[in-house]
Amino acid sequence: MSAVILDGKALAASIREDLSQKVQTLIEETGVKPTLAVIVAGDDPASAVYVRNKERACIGAGMGSIVDRLPQDVTQEELEALVRRYNEDDSIHGILVQLPLPKHLDESRVLELIDPKKDVDGFHAVNMGALLSGMEGFVPCTPKGVMRLIESAGIDLSGKNAVIVGRSNIVGKPAALLLLQKNATVTVCHSKTEDLSSFTKNADVLVAAVGRPNMITGDMVKPGAVVIDVGINRTESGLVGDVDFASASEVAGYITPVPGGVGPMTIAMLLENTYIGAKNSCAKA
Ligand code: GUN
């Protein structure tokens, strides 16, 4: 292996440590305890794990954590009533509705109901629009964590070819905007892209966010590239990313492992966004 490992676990731990100090100070100075409300509906096993990790991380940083576990057959009205209640509750600074929701629920209607000032996921159209136009707002946690990891390695993105594989609202699209803000030349590839490797082979920075185990192999990677693996795929051989680590790490200059790369950064950024929400609520009061 030649690539330098981008250790998201270690970076996330230091961000969380730093945040817990800031949380303590905020509580001492204002009495406001940053608090996150997480709503999860149904029994998706992956969601259950993510939500438990988010809850533990909040408590570990001295923040408040509320988790509502709703049944699979919860109605749209019940879910919306809960979001409305948290919108009105001044002791809640972040609201996160865990995705995916059960099929009968209208995801975008729920997300658009969240007060943009409490939308720590950054999925509300107001926050997405702010990101698009370079205004202040909540930035989605996973792409924000990706940028932090790249910055931590001291990598200058200006003029570099950045290729993102995946065009989701959660990762691909916001990652494209953040890389563009740093003056990268950005290409977004997706399931209909023809000759994918002709793009990936030119990428100085390659972000894989498709949810297909080991699909990016070493022969698709430019020598010395920064390879960021956002995939978390549960397979018979355990947790694997979208990048075939064994072959890609022979070619890349930097690479994130799975687990221990982007995943822990997502949670650290969620805590940071919740802290920002709490801090902003003080400024407003
Ligand atoms: N499901 C997978 N990733 C995420 C995320 O970042 N936020 C929410 N709310 N749901 C998710």
Image: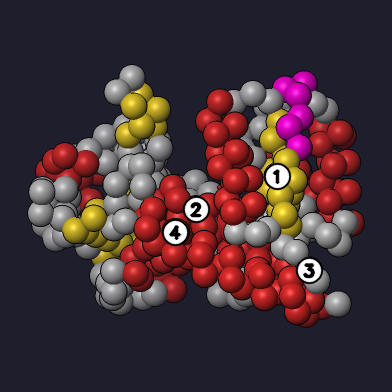
- For image coordinates 64% across by 23% down, the residue present is 43
CB of mark 4 near ligand 1 (< 8 Å): no
Per the rendering, the mark at residue 32 is 3
Q: Is residue 55 above or below residue 145?
A: above
Q: Amino acid at mark 3?
A: Val
Residue that label 1 marks: 38
The answer to if 15 sits in the magenta stretch is: no
Alpha carbon separation for disc pair 3 and 1: 19 Å
The answer to whether one can see residue 193 in this image is: no
Residue type pointed to by label 1: Val
Residue located beneath label 2 in the image: 266
Query: Can you tell me whether the CB of the residue at mark 2 lies under 8 Å from the nearest atom of ligand 1?
Result: yes
Q: Earlier in the sequence, mark 4 or mark 2?
A: 4
Asked whether mark 1 lies closer than 8 Å to ligand 1, one says: no
Q: Nearer the viewer, residue 101 or 273?
A: 273
Residue 79 at least partly seen: yes
What residue did someone put label 4 on?
Answer: 12
